[in-house]
Image (cartoon, grey):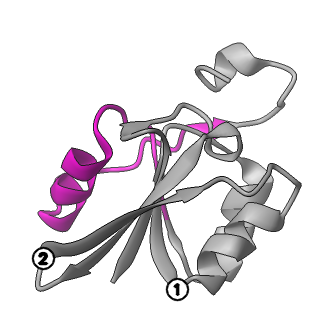
């Protein structure tokens, strides 16, 4: 299973599309077996969800995300977990234990950055 986390470094970022990088974790039998940092290739509507799904990502963890991105992830059968904070690896380990739940933190308008956390 591949799990991606929108980050700045190793910290979960408040808005999916504006992150610095994605930490991508490979998990087997509930344990992380590989991790890599992939630079954000750019925030263009509809691009990032397909970019990650094409890399085999099955779960995306983020602080917040626009509804369009959520829709594309849903169409690509990628589970979306929103409202996460803190260290990416810790969040993935919590997810693998079944302890990380989405709060549904969807950003409705990009002009209102205060709704999405830091940009």
Task: Answer above or below: position of 106 versus 56.
Answer: above
Relative to 31, 53 lies left or right: right
- Whether tag 2 and tag 1 are in contact, CB under 8 A, the answer is no
| Mark 1 nearby-residue class (10 Å; few <14, some 14–19, many ≥20) | some
Magenta highlight on residue 73: no
Q: Nearer the viewer, residue 91 or 89?
A: 89
Question: Can residue 22 be seen from the camera position used here?
Answer: yes
Task: Answer above or below: position of 78 versus 100.
Answer: below
Question: Can residue 84 be seen from the camera position used here?
Answer: no
Quarter of the image holding residue 86?
top left
Residue 114, horizontal then vertical, whole percent: 68, 14
Residue 1, horizontal then vertical, whole percent: 33, 84
| Mark 2 nearby-residue class (10 Å; few <14, some 14–19, many ≥20) | some
Quarter of the image holding residue 54?
bottom right
Residue 66, horizontal then vertical, whole percent: 73, 45
- How far apart marks 2 and 1 lie (CA) works out to 17 Å
Q: Identify which residue is drawn at 61% across, 40% down.
A: 19
Relative to 19, 36 lies left or right: left
Residue 98, horizontal then vertical, whole percent: 17, 62
Q: Identify which residue is drawn at 36% across, 41% down.
A: 10
SS type, badge 2? loop
Q: Quadrant of the C terminus?
A: top right
Q: Residue furthest top?
A: 114
According to the picture, the residue beneath numbered tag 1 turns out to be: 56
Q: What's drawn in magenta, residue-wise?
A: 80-106
Q: Identify which residue is drawn at 18% across, 66% down.
A: 96
According to the picture, the residue beneath numbered tag 2 turns out to be: 30
């Amino acid at each position: 299973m591949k799990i991606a986390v929108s980050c700045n470094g190793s910290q979960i970022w408040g808005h999916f599309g504006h992150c610095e990088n994605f930490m991508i974790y490979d998990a087997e039998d509930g344990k992380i077996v590989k991790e890599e940092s992939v630079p954000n290739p750019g925030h263009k509507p509809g691009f990032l969800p397909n970019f990650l799904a094409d890399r085999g990502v099955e779960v995306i963890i983020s602080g917040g995300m626009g509804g369009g991105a959520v829709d594309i992830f849903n169409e690509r059968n990628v589970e979306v977990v929103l409202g996460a904070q803190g260290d990416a690896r810790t969040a993935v380990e919590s997810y693998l234990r079944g302890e990380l739940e989405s709060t549904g933190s969807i950003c409705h308008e990009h002009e209102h950055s205060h709704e999405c956390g830091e940009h």
